[in-house]
Image: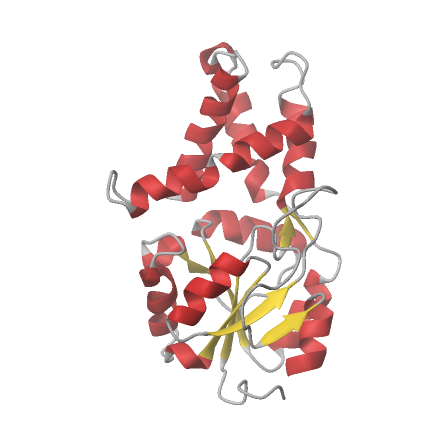
Amino acid sequence: MRAGFDSVKALVFDMFGTVVDWRSSVAAEVAVHLRDHVPDLVPLEFADAWRAEYQPSMERVRNGDREFVRLDVLHRENLEHVLRGLGVDPNSIPAPVLDETNLAWHRLDPWPDAVAGLTRLKEQFIIAPLSNANIRLALDVAKRAGLAWDAILGAEVAAAYKPDPDAYLRTADILGLEPQQVAMVAAHNSDLAAAQSLGLRTAFVRRPTEHGPDQTIDLEPTGDWDVIAEDFEDLADQIG
């Protein structure tokens, strides 16, 4: 057992980018649903543009400009914003097509090591997403991908989006654990920094192609994290 993990009872995981490959998955869905509605559609670029609206839309909730709404609502608003940016009136696309496109985020493929690694980690720890995803989104991804979560936790349960402290602290409280008994697993240094500042243990997992072959962020750990792993199998080897 890795030093410092002997008291850890639960591992909570960032989902988008850490557990699942959102970029390729969303691009594949966009290619199917919007190809007849968006001129000169480049699916990967569309996926990147859609994802670029993710943090700004949540920040309006975090700073109090609007009440908490689930991520499905933000994703739909962001989808329409991206379409307008490409000169496409969302009202020109049938609502059922937009609804189905928005469900792309419910059909994300796991990284190749995710299912086997999580299954191993589940033998010793409580495992759950601590994601900004809403419950139904996370459930749909888990059912489709075979992710063996013990619970679905995160933003909608805590009514707070990471890196709001409540997202982490309420999740630990729901599990009946102290922050130091919970380890945050993420491919994003900023997520780990927020968790560490609140007393959670931290595990950095490399996902160097989350943003494609030209990724420039989160290629290396930038903090003093408790564990640095190449993937979930390596994480299980180190702390299992």
From the viewer's perspective, tell me whether residue 163 is left or right of residue 88.
left
Q: Is residue 69 visible?
A: no
In the rendered image of this protein, does residue 205 appear above or below residue 107? below
Left or right of residue 218: residue 230 = right
Q: Quadrant of the N terminus?
A: bottom right
Residue at (25, 42) in percent of width and height: 67
**Residue 146 shows in the view:** yes
Residue 122 x, y percent position in the rendering:
61, 75
Q: Nearer the viewer, residue 187 or 22?
A: 187
Point out the image quarter for the C terminus: bottom right
Q: What x and y, as percent, mark residue 22? A: 62, 44
Tell me the quarter of the picture where residue 147 sits: bottom right
Describe the colour scheme in one phrase. secondary structure
Q: Nearer the viewer, residue 173 or 55?
A: 55
Residue positioned 61% across, 43% down in the render: 107
Q: Nearer the viewer, residue 225 or 93?
A: 225
Residue 163 placed where, x, y %?
40, 56
234 vs 76: above or below: below
- Relative to 124, residue 198 above or below: above
Q: Residue at x 38, y 72 (%)?
A: 172
Residue 165, picture quadrant:
bottom left
